[in-house]
Amino acid sequence: MADEIKLTLSRYNPDKDGEYTTQTYTIPYHNDWSILDALNHIKAELDGSISYRWSCRMAVCGSCGMMVNGTPRLTCSTYLNEFYPGEISLEPLANFPVVRDLVVDISDFMAKLTSIKPWIIRKNKKDEVDVSSEYLQTPAQMTVYRQQSLCINCTLCYAACPVYGLHPEFIGPAVIALGYRYNNDSRDEGKEERRKVLANEAGVWKCTVVGDCTEVCPKHVDPSAAIQRTKVDSAISWFFSKLTGRGE
Amino acid sequence: MSLIKRINALEPLWWSLFGLGGTMAAFLFPVHIFIQGVAIPLGWVSSELLHYERLVVFLHSPIVKIYLFLLIVPPLFHAAHRIRLTLEDLRIEWLDRVLPLLCYGGAILLTIMTLIVLL
């Protein structure tokens, strides 16, 4: 008999019974299968009723994140061979409301993402629509923010962050990392606008430097470092505003 | 604004002291642990270095006083901030209401005691 591996999936269907249950599937083991391949096998061959999100299969779209044996991972780049001959448990991403089975509702994240204005802001608004002029950037200037620009919005860092779990108002690792990315872009002039979102109690000051965001990030964005660097910046502007008597 | 809210509004100050204290502790503590905890007991460095009369004269120098202040005080605030954040995650409501006061108040009290001893 061919080798087999067991996957236990969280099941939840609000239209049926609304109960959280689990279901175990035994599937053939392939050394080169990702967990997403296994889920697609289950969906196609064993149980068409399971729900999960996926798209690109190459860690670019950021939609297939799940709790794999309790840790947030992208299932397209997590392989069965890491766990075989052990079993695998799959749960929806922690800290988010569950829509169905392994699908979570990330609208809270999407609202926070927009609030940080993750695009290049110019003081002269004409610059943003005028595409005829060039905004040159040296490789050194790009290096400053490149790491944080690699974020794919997969929300694994939100599932890993205990602070976000305890305080849902926290704007969270990826959003702060993106704020850092645009603030440190030499073409951007929107630092003041973003400060209102970054430098307050629901912003960088909520972070307690757990560092799990950086641990789980599949693109090595290092949100924790971005948060701590933004804290330095926010603290300097706070001291400055206290000294000069200007409002923050 | 309640006292606790006022304390929390100073978060950038607490965090800056936390950062300064962490840096001081990381750079200076190992040196002291090595000299006083390893090198002298093992006889690599003469224990005459810690002789009372010698130290008393040494401690009267203003530079040494500033050094000791920086060695002792910022790490107090580092500890206060870290203890506060760790205990806050336990979400004990009555504790949350007094915690900032206990932690930073304790650090300020110990700072005053340090100044009394040094000056």
Image (cartoon, coloured by chain):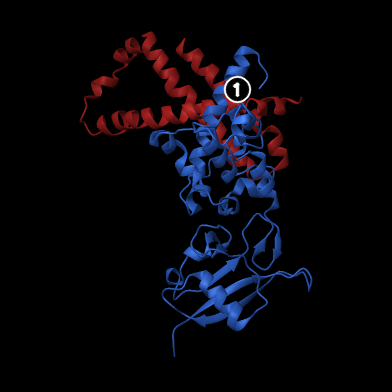
Which chain, by letter, is red?
A: B
The image quarter containing residue B108 is: top right
Q: Secondary structure beneath disc 1?
A: helix
Look at 72% across and 25% down and name the residue there.
B3
Residue B90 location (% of width, % of height)? 64, 45
The correct choice, above or below, for A157 with respect to A41 in the image is above
Q: Residue at x 41, y 13 (%)?
A: B65
Q: Residue at x 26, y 29 (%)?
A: B40
- The chain containing the residue under callout 1 comes to A
Q: Residue at x 64, y 80 (%)?
A: A47
User: x and y percent of residue B56 in the render?
Assistant: 35, 12
Q: On screen, A222 above or below A141?
A: below
Quadrant including the N terminus of chain B: top right
> From the viewer's perspective, is A23 left or right of B110?
right
Name the amino acid, label 1.
Trp
Q: Colour of chain A?
A: blue
Q: Residue furthest bottom?
A: A1
CA neighbours of label 1 inside 10 A, class few (<14), some (14 to 19), many (20+): many
Count the labels in the image. 1
Specify the farthest residue to the front. Answer: A132
Residue designated by label 1: A238
Say which of A141 and A209 sits in front. Answer: A141
**Does residue B60 show up?**
no
Specify the quadrant of the image occupied by residue B4: top right
Does residue A143 appear to the left or right of A187 in the view shown? left
